[in-house]
Amino acid sequence: MTLAEVQSACNAKIGLLWPSFQVLQNGYFQKHGKYFQVLKNGGGIDGTETQFSIRTPVDEKYESDIDKSVALTVPCEVEVHEWQRNGDTEAGYMVILSLYFKGKQYRREMYSNGRDTGWGVYKPLSVR
């Protein structure tokens, strides 16, 4: 597979999840006043498909409300983070898709407000 094929496969799989995921997140927010988070799934190396699973952080108070029965394999890592700014006046969530192809990491970020970074090479910040 080429990088473009792996990215397209990941986009297609996430495209299947995205509408229902938004409904789940909005319902969760209405009930609990926050969005749920999902820990990173394994996989995403040179197009290898792995089972998507919803694993929540240990500090997620309302874990039982999240449907964990998603039957889907994905060729990328998937993680979800809640974000806030301006105190508590603005909040949302972001989905980070990561994949590794021939030794490089690529990343795409999709936000609840519609922002989408598209795929790009990810270079972590180095700390001295």
Image: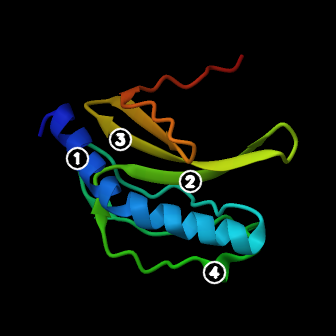
Q: Nearer the viewer, mark 3 or mark 2?
A: 2
Q: Is residue 55 visible?
A: no
Q: Secondary structure at mark 3?
A: strand
Disc 3/disc 1 C-alpha distance (Å):
8 Å
User: Which quadrant of the structure image shows residue 70?
Assistant: bottom left
Q: Tell us which disc is closer to us: 4 or 1.
A: 4
Give the Cα separation between the discs numbered 3 and 4: 28 Å
Which residue extends farthest right? 87
Badge 4 vs badge 1, beta-carbon distance below 8 Å: no
Q: Disc 3 versus disc 2: distance between alpha carbons?
A: 15 Å
Residue at mark 1: 47
Q: CA distance from mark 1 to mark 2?
A: 20 Å
Neighbor class of circle 1 (other Cα within 10 Å; few <14, some 14-19, many 20+) is: many
Q: Residues within 10 Å of mark 2 (few under 14, many from 20)?
A: many
Side (left or right) of 92 relative to 33 = left
Q: Are marks 4 and 2 in contact (CB under 8 Å)?
A: no
Q: Which residue is mark 4?
A: 65
Q: Which mark is residue 80?
A: 2
**Circle 4: element type:** helix
Residue nearer the viewer, 30 or 65: 30
Residue mark closest to the camera, 1 vs 2: 2
Disc 4/disc 2 C-alpha distance (Å): 16 Å
Which residue is painted at 28% across and 64% down in the image?
73
Tell how many labels.
Answer: 4
Q: Quadrant of residue 101?
A: top left
Cα–Cα gap, marks 4 and 1: 31 Å
Pinpoint residue 96: horizontal percent, then vertical percent.
49, 44
